[in-house]
């Protein structure tokens, strides 16, 4: 009896540890299997996970770029989309959180829970975490991704995409 109880405890601990490990970490490095969903379109790789409690969206964008990359949430168009930009300049990570208006955007109250951008081997990766309640419609996320070839937040994209992700 005692033995089976400790086996059950062991299995429970392993299960909890496995669940905890499966959440992505916003460190600018996309590891194999880190995200539940992966899409590739327009030369942009995007990845998504919804936390098991439904509270947090983890997302990543990777593009061949030495300039900016960005993810946006809550809209299929720039207008009304909550954007997170990142680039690396002289080894330093630079971020901005902006709200789209028409085809422009401006600074907004920061909404991300975590963010990190890394440039390596000609690729730039941005990983973020955002509150799901703010952007999910049921189990569906309207999201954008884009990249530009300058280290700034104003030069227009060289590639961009709009998509719906169902968790
Ligand atoms: C950096 C400054 C930006 C400028 C100057 C800019 C400018 C524009 C312009 C002029 C268009 C219409 C022409 C076209 O279809 O390409 C457009 C469309 C679009 N942009 Fe941007 N953009 C910027 C940033 C972003 C960001 C950060 C994202 C996503 C994270 C994004 C995603 C899109 C998408 C999905 C469209 C097509 C849908 C729509 O019309 O809104 N853009 N952008």
Image (tube, rainbow, N blue to C red):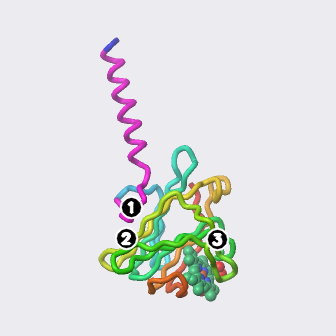
Q: Which residue is mark 3?
A: 81
Q: Residue 30's spot in the image, x, y percent?
A: 37, 63
Exactly how many numbered labels are in the figure?
A: 3
Q: Split into 4 quadrants, where in the image is the N terminus?
A: top left
Disc 2 crowd rating (10 Å Cα; few below 14, some 14-19, many 20+) is many
Q: Is residue 48 in sight in this rendering?
A: no
Write the start and end of the magenta stretch as one range. 3-31
The residue nearer to you, when weighing 21 against 128, is: 128
Disc 1 crowd rating (10 Å Cα; few below 14, some 14-19, many 20+) is some
In the displayed structure, does residue 90 sit left or right of residue 85?
left
Residue at 46% in and 79% down: 68
Q: Which residue is mark 2?
A: 118
Q: Residue 82's spot in the image, x, y percent?
A: 62, 68
Q: Which residue is mark 1?
A: 27
The residue nearer to you, when weighing 89 against 84, is: 89
Q: Is residue 4 above or below residue 20?
A: above
Q: Residue 152's spot in the image, x, y percent?
A: 49, 83
Secondary-structure class at tag 2:
strand
The residue nearer to you, when weighing 142 against 39, is: 142
**Mark 3 beta carbon near ligand 1 (under 8 Å):** yes
Secondary-structure class at tag 3:
loop
Residue at 39% in and 82% down: 66
Q: Do the residues bearing badges 1 and 3 touch, measured as CB atoms within 8 Å?
A: no
Please tell me in which quarter of the rendered image ligand 1 is found. Answer: bottom right
Q: Is residue 117 in sight in this rendering?
A: yes
Q: Earlier in the sequence, mark 1 or mark 2?
A: 1
Alpha carbon of mark 1 to alpha carbon of mark 3: how far?
23 Å
């Amino acid at each position: 009896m005692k033995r089976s109880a400790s086996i059950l405890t062991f299995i429970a601990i392993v299960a909890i540890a496995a669940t905890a490990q499966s959440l992505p970490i916003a460190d600018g490095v996309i590891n194999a299997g880190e995200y539940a969903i992966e899409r590739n379109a327009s030369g942009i790789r995007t990845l998504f996970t919804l936390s098991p409690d439904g509270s947090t969206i983890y997302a990543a964008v990777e593009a061949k770029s030495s300039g900016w990359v960005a993810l946006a949430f809550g809209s299929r168009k720039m207008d009304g989309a909550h954007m997170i930009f990142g680039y690396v300049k002289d080894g330093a990570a630079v971020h901005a959180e902006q709200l789209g208006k028409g085809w422009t955007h401006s600074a907004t109250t920061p909404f991300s829970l975590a963010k990190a951008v890394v440039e390596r081997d000609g690729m730039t990766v941005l990983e973020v975490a955002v509150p799901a309640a703010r952007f999910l419609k049921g189990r569906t996320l309207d999201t954008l991704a884009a990249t530009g070839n300058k280290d700034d937040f104003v030069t227009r994209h060289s590639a961009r995409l709009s998509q719906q992700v169902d968790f």
